[in-house]
């Protein structure tokens, strides 16, 4: 059986440039997502972008109001959209809070803390990506900070300010939101159920550990399963950590008794975001020798060793050939659709509409493939 992608992808791709290959693969994935009604139309997409800008700017203003005494006028970060980060975390927090039946009076607070948490995670990721030598010097301090719920946020900022070769304003903003998040979450954890508090601290630590392992390379993982687990933790645990912030506002017996089911639901949401991001970054990741779930699938199907020497610009066309040979894009899109179906079924199971969470996912898909 010839796959959708093998039929659509011309054999002449061997003569194409990296950008041409990227454009062709992007169009093929986009067509498949559109067939499954998983992309917003142009008007819906523009409306969602306007909503993102409006909510993001409102959240930025909230931060400005809290730090007006510091006389920091511009909170924009080079190469990052701070309003977009805040919007993503906030919207996710509002949707999860609604699904969890969080009291309406607490939903905005839960979403606000999710906005801060998501921004902390993204900014830290950028700092470490741009300064790989910081992995070792930050490791111990960061673990302490995570375990103690950012009580020692000054220590990370002190180290970054001393060593980091990055925009100083990023560090200032990181310090500001660290303090805000620390104050909010410490009080919340004191009041919530101990089981939720312990799970939160455990996942907080695991989330950071998976980030720090990135600096050590995948050579530390002897098996494919360990590589997969590492990549999955690094890309999905953050969503469970953020969901636990929402759960802390409503630690009912019903939620606590079904915590494992909620975790599976949230991690499936994270899997979807991870998969769509890696599909979008596939060509660039091969070119830059970065690990990616699609690349791992390509190497596994062909029986190649998991070594970065299999990646890089010289191997791009070879790996795309292997991908087509094993119908890997078809398989990955089918996996995506299966996970989306699980999201819908779980929402039906708890008697909630899946419309909002699917709309958010469609927006993320559209950002990459419209």
Image (tube, rainbow, N blue to C red):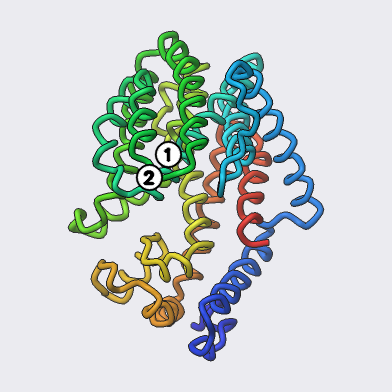
- Residue at position x 59%, y 69% in the image: 26
In the figure, residue 202 lies in which quadrant?
A: top left
In the image, residue 308 sits, relative to residue 242, either above or below, namely: below
Q: Nearer the viewer, residue 169 or 23?
A: 169
- Residue at position x 49%, y 83% in the image: 1
Q: Which mark is residue 8?
A: none
In the figure, residue 24 lies in which quadrant?
A: bottom right
Taking the image as shown, residue 201 lies to the left or right of residue 90, namely left
What is the C-alpha distance between the residues marked 2 and 1? 6 Å
* Image quadrant containing the C terminus: bottom right
In the image, residue 39 sits, relative to residue 83, either above or below, namely: below
Per the image, label 2 sits on a secondary structure element best described as helix
The spot of residue 220 in percent (x, y) is: 19, 54
In the image, residue 293 sits, relative to residue 119, either above or below, namely: below
Q: Which residue has dot 1 on it?
A: 124
Residue 136 in view? yes
Taking the image as shown, residue 234 lies to the left or right of residue 12, namely left
The spot of residue 31 in percent (x, y) is: 65, 69
- Residue at position x 29%, y 43% in the image: 135
Per the image, label 1 sits on a secondary structure element best described as helix
Q: Nearer the viewer, residue 22 or 62?
A: 62
Taking the image as shown, residue 196 lies to the left or right of residue 344, namely left
Is the C-beta separation of discs 2 and 1 under 8 Å? yes
Taking the image as shown, residue 226 lies to the left or right of residue 238, namely left
Q: Residues within 10 Å of mark 2 (few under 14, many from 20)?
A: some
The spot of residue 290 in percent (x, y) is: 37, 62
Q: Which residue has dot 2 on it?
A: 128
């Amino acid at each position: 059986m010839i796959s959708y992608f093998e039929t659509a992808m011309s054999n002449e791709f061997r003569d194409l440039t990296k950008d041409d290959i990227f454009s062709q693969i992007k169009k093929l994935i986009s067509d498949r997502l559109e067939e499954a009604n998983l992309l917003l139309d142009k008007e819906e997409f523009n409306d969602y972008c306007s909503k993102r800008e409006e909510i993001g700017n409102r959240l930025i203003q909230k931060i400005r109001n809290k730090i007006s005494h510091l006389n920091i006028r511009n909170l924009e970060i080079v190469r990052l959209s701070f309003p977009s980060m805040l919007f993503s975390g906030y919207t996710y927090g509002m949707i999860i809070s609604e699904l969890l039946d969080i009291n309406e009076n607490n939903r905005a607070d839960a979403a606000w803390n999710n906005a801060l948490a998501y921004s902390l995670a993204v900014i830290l990721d950028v700092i470490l990506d741009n300064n790989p030598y910081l992995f070792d010097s930050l490791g111990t301090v960061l673990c302490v900070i995570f375990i103690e719920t950012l009580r020692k946020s000054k220590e990370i900022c002190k180290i970054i300010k001393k060593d980091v070769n990055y925009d100083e304003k990023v560090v200032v903003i990181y310090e500001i939101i660290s303090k805000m998040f620390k104050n909010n979450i410490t009080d919340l954890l004191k009041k919530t159920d101990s089981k939720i508090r312990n799970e939160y601290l455990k996942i907080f630590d695991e989330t950071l550990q998976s980030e720090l392992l990135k600096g050590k390379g995948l050579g530390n993982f002897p098996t494919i399963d360990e590589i997969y687990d590492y990549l999955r933790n690094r890309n999905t645990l953050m969503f469970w950590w953020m969901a636990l912030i929402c759960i802390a506002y409503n630690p009912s017996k019903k939620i606590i008794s079904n915590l494992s089911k909620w975790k599976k639901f949230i991690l499936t949401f994270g899997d979807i975001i991870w998969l769509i991001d890696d599909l979008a970054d596939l060509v660039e990741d091969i070119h830059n020798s970065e690990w990616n779930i699609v690349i791992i699938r390509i190497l596994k199907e062909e029986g190649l060793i998991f070594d970065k020497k299999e990646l890089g610009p010289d191997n791009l066309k070879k790996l795309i050939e292997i991908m087509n040979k094993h119908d890997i894009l078809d398989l990955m899109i089918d996996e995506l659709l299966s996970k989306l179906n699980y999201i819908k079924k779980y929402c039906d199971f708890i008697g909630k509409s899946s419309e909002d969470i699917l709309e958010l996912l469609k927006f993320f898909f559209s950002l990459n493939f419209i």
